[in-house]
Amino acid sequence: MKVIHLISGGDSGGAKTHVLSLLQHLNRTITAQLVCFRDGPFAAEARSLGIPTMICGGNHIFKIRRRLAEYIRREGFQLIHCHGSRANMIGALLRRLTGLPVVTTIHSDYKIDYMGRPLARCTFGVINTWALRRLDYRVGVSDAMVDLLISRGFPADRFYAIYNGIDFTPAPDQGDRLPYLRSLGADVEADSVVVGIAARLNPVKDMSTLIRGFAEAYKACGKLRLVIAGDGEERENLGALARELGVERQVTFAGWISGGMDRFYSALDINVLTSLSETFSYALTEGARFHLATISTAVGGIPYLIDDGVNGYLFQPRDFMTLGKRLAKLGNGPALRHEMGEKLFEKASARFSIEKTVETQLHIYGEILRRHSRPRARRDGAVICGAYGRGNAGDDAILEAILEEMRSIDPDMPVTVISKDPRSTRLACRVRSVSRVDLPGWLGAMRRAKLYINGGGSLIQDVTSRRSLWFYLMNIRAAKWAGCRVQMYGCGIGPVSRENHRKLAAKVLNRNVDVITLREPDSLEELKSMGVDRPDIRLTADPALTLSPAAEEKTDSVLLRAGVPPHGERYICFALRPWPGFREKAPLFGAAARYAWERYGLSPVFTAVEKGQDPAAAREAARELGDIPRYFLDDAGAAGTIIGSLSRMEIVVSMRLHALIFAAGQGIPLAGVVYDPKVSAFLRYIGQENFTDLETLTEETLRRLIDRAAARAGDKQAQAEAVRKLREMERGNVEIAKRLLG
């Protein structure tokens, strides 16, 4: 593989470090040619590292373009990789001339790159914005950066994330830290707890918050010292602030550190970052290499490295009081510093090493080249329509599962999702999405697609809304009219109660659907009773059964943010939803939670599946608990972390179908409260009769359900076997989609 990298050549900071480190290691596997548009220290350093480097200078853009195009063709490069505004502009001009795919790595937020420089912003900033929109693919240096750019309207399915990796080879012993720190001007003793930061002293780094937070922490931990490595326009103001707060002797401004940063980081006890904006900071991974306890603002890609309360602490920008409390806690807790530093090193070295960065970059190159060579067809890919973008974790889990299965058929398949909130769908799934009300948008997508998927859940029903039923039937009809094959995918049917609706549904489904796959037998009976018999109808299972729990540390972080101790307590989960008749029954759930606490020692956790509705229902039920501890998991994140959270429960009592599906997949004993036939249908499908109707619910009934579930806590084999069989049946959804796609 031969890749040409374009960069201005005057770069510094994280972008410079990333590019040089990446190319040095890439050249051990592929040919990675560096082209700089000016000579100087950057190019000189690249040459010293053994990176093939060419200078293509001058101000005549079209001469540079012609020269580079000739060079690219002559040398047989397969891909153009840009870094920075000038390179992006040249890359955009080379795109059609060479016919090669062009990718750019976006190292920082292009909207603030020229902050305080209005002329540069009006020239380079505008040109860069134009160029970024015209390149084929984009790489953000964190998932947060990718999310930011998708939210600004960049194509969601043309993005990749790559994190700044470093070499985690253990550094040699750096010697006694006291002489070194004192050489920087620090007033330290052997028992001092040294807090450090390496960053430019400019407003974006928000050092004033650091000094204010340090001053608060110093009141509670007199052993703390702060050493700031860096310089910039804020130096005088920050020095004045330290004097004003009475910590002038405890704060050291060391200026720029020469000769590498290993000596600096080895001298610290706590690494800190207070930036208002970041992509993914090298300073934190460099500190992690030295096993440093770390506190940082929760900005950019940093939460992907630091799990708050697990391997470090996060706080919101400018919140110096929280920073102060956490600095004091670490300052007074040597064991805690050690524990968090070790956990951070473990995660960073596994996921954010330079080897991992290179591996990811090579994977990205391979995928881009594969996608670029993919034959173009008049019709390609799929349109997926369902109850997405409503904040319901169950529906969004169905979408996540279907997308995974479409990518298992063809990883490069173009997919468009019809969503109530296309922005949130793009961000969550990195997929094209159009609004439910954007008729031209989804009709255009249907005309380009091979397959239309009516995507899981109970979409064909009239209990929650007549308009919803009409929308999905109209959508199915439009898809067939537009020339798509139509599959209803692992869905539930009904109840459809109105006779005119039953006739309409039967007419539309019989005429326009090729295959219907169902998640349980009750839906099959509903279709038969409606007279739906022309499509091929198969019994499969809910796609969400295929999803896996998130990594343990991610689940721990979600639980900790909600105040739920991830270890040391035993829990019973309640997943409730507002429904006609629920308010009258809410006290019964509170009484059941009290019973589980008193009888089995289980602390109640109220988990929201639909964030907009369920928390209110949870608090209604919890009013009955008095002084019994209770926890509210109002936002457990995506499906993976919800599944991970439910896996920590001893029992799950749920009105929500997908809480039961998620918990069943983890072997957790279940108790269902049926507000809709789909709940009992699923439980019967996995051989569990431990449920009761909401309408007839009593306190005694709930207690019996909990007792039965508790009795099964030690024997999960039967449930696990039933779920395993359903997962095998679910593969039928994928096989049928594959056949319909040809």
Image (cartoon, rainbow, N blue to C red):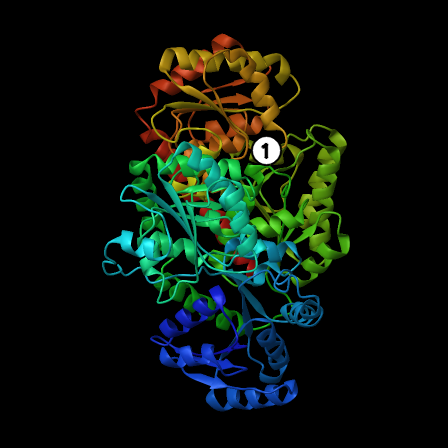
Q: Quadrant of the C terminus?
A: bottom right
Q: Residue furthest top?
A: 700
| Residue with the mark numbered 1 | 610
Give the residue type that dot 1 points to.
Answer: Glu
Q: Quadrant of residue 101?
A: bottom right
Q: Position of residue 499 (x, y in %)?
A: 74, 30
Residue 655 vertical position relative to residue 121 in the rendered view, above or below: above
Residue at (58, 40) in percent of width and height: 395
Pick the front one: 252 or 293: 252
x and y percent of residue 323 in the render? Answer: 48, 39
- Quadrant containing the N terminus is bottom left
Label 1 neighbourhood size at 10 Å, few (<14), some (14-19), many (20+)? many
Number of disc labels: 1
Percent of width and height locating residue 143? 51, 54
Query: Closest to the observer: 260 or 106?
Result: 260
Query: Is 430 in front, or is 474?
Result: 430
Residue at 36% over, 34% down: 720
Residue 95 pos. (x, y %): 60, 79
Can residue 482 be spotted in the picture?
yes
The answer to whether 615 is drawn above or below residue 285 in the figure is above
Q: Which SS class for mark 1?
A: loop
Q: Quadrant of residue 31?
A: bottom left
Residue 21 position (above or below residue 180):
below
| Residue drawn at (36%, 24%) of the image | 569
Residue 349 visible? The answer is no
